[in-house]
Amino acid sequence: MTESGYQDREQSEIKHHAIRLYLEAAARIVGSAFDIKYVDCCAGPWNSRDSEYRDTSFGIAFDVLKASHAELAKRGRVLSIDCLFIEKEPDHFRLLDAFAKKQTSLGIKVRAENWDFVERIDDIVHYCSPRGAFPFILIDPWGWKLAGISQISPLLKLKPGEVVINLMSSFITRFVNDPATDLSDLLGEDFPELRKLSGTELEFAVVRKYCDLIKREGKFSYVCALPVMKPDTDAFNFYLIYATRHPKGVEVFKQVEKRTEELTHLVRADVQRRQRQEKTGNFELFDSQVLYRERKYQQLAEENRVRAKKRVWQLLAESDSVSYDDCWAEALQFPAVYQSDLREWLTEWEKDGKLQVKGRKKPTEVLKRSYGHSLALPGKSR
């Protein structure tokens, strides 16, 4: 069932679930070695129905970071956690500021600023730059204009650091063919080439293009995209774009993506049941999952498995030998593609004699990242 307070905005429930899972894992991993700077560039609150703001991104972040601070302290790791919550709209800022002043506690400093974050990028960079600090940046704007590469470039270049961006793909694909809409700062100067595409191919190309530009601008090693569906229609609303420089981050984020996918179907099934009951007035005896209908996510997964499989084969064809780690990184950056998919392809190719695997300590050893496994096509290995 949908959580209290999220009815009619279930996409926020799904997004907040992903943010919570990500921060719970990331804060504990990073906090063991770094102090944490957390920045929410468009904090709100927006449409909150909870007096403690537990249904907002900043409220969730504070709760998670507070719990992480306490847990790490039990292990003997005393770290500093600073939160900067930014909101441009004055009325919303007043609520945000009251929350910040109420929540600051020992070990966690919370600060709210009434800023247009794009105009205060230098201040944000300065805030995130003390020695020994690791910044987590959340950019979750209305629309797409504030996600432009040139506007957020200094935040992408923070090292160390990770970034999560809400990319409103549904809006972008709607306007990409509008001659009056300039998407060059979001998708590159050659974005008009995307107008040759339509449907799922256009959506994939938009997301992939943005991810590639984020990776290049911030010199990230990995950029993943987590799809969030509309609660009441079989379509995607937006993608959470995640950029990191460490493979452990990808590993964590893919776990988040899988668990978020599971929640997505539960939430959407509940919405579908509610809509049926409102239409017919009949109470349903069956679990909401029994009559659940969904095609879009299945289509995304099927198409991306084909794309990722083709890309991994291309990597193998282009080199004498490729590490399993590199194949893993390439495949898992495709939404709805997981390590189990990669292993299935490699097993298939090896069984058919199309692939040689080196570095196994024994023939039955499962291929894993950081185990020194390498892959090559027959006749190409040296």
Image (cartoon, rainbow, N blue to C red):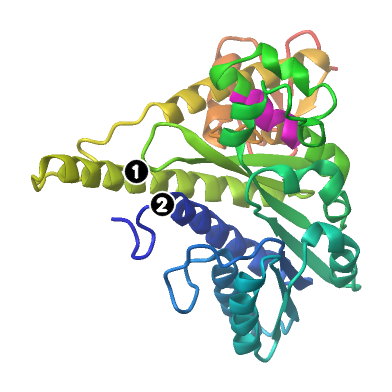
Q: Residue 79: percent from the left, percent from the top?
A: 74, 81
Q: Is the C-beta separation of discs 1 and 2 under 8 Å?
A: yes
Q: Which comes before the other along the chain, label 1 or label 2?
A: 2
Q: Residue at x 83, y 18 (%)?
A: 319
Residue 69 position by quadrant: bottom right
Determine whether the residue tagged by mark 2 lies in a helix, strand or loop: helix
Image: magenta residue range: 203-211
- Quadrant location, the C terminus: top right
Name the residue type under label 1: Arg
Q: Residue 39: percent from the left, percent from the top?
A: 73, 66
Q: Is residue 205 magenta?
A: yes
Reading the image, the residue beneath label 1 is: 268
Residue 286 position by quadrant: top left
Q: Nearer the viewer, residue 194 or 226?
A: 194
Q: Which label was assigned to residue 35? A: none
- Quadrant location, the N terminus: bottom left
Q: Is residue 292 magenta?
A: no
- Magenta region, mostly helix, strand or loop? helix
Reading the image, the residue beneath label 2 is: 10
Total count of labels: 2
Residue 129 at least partly seen = yes
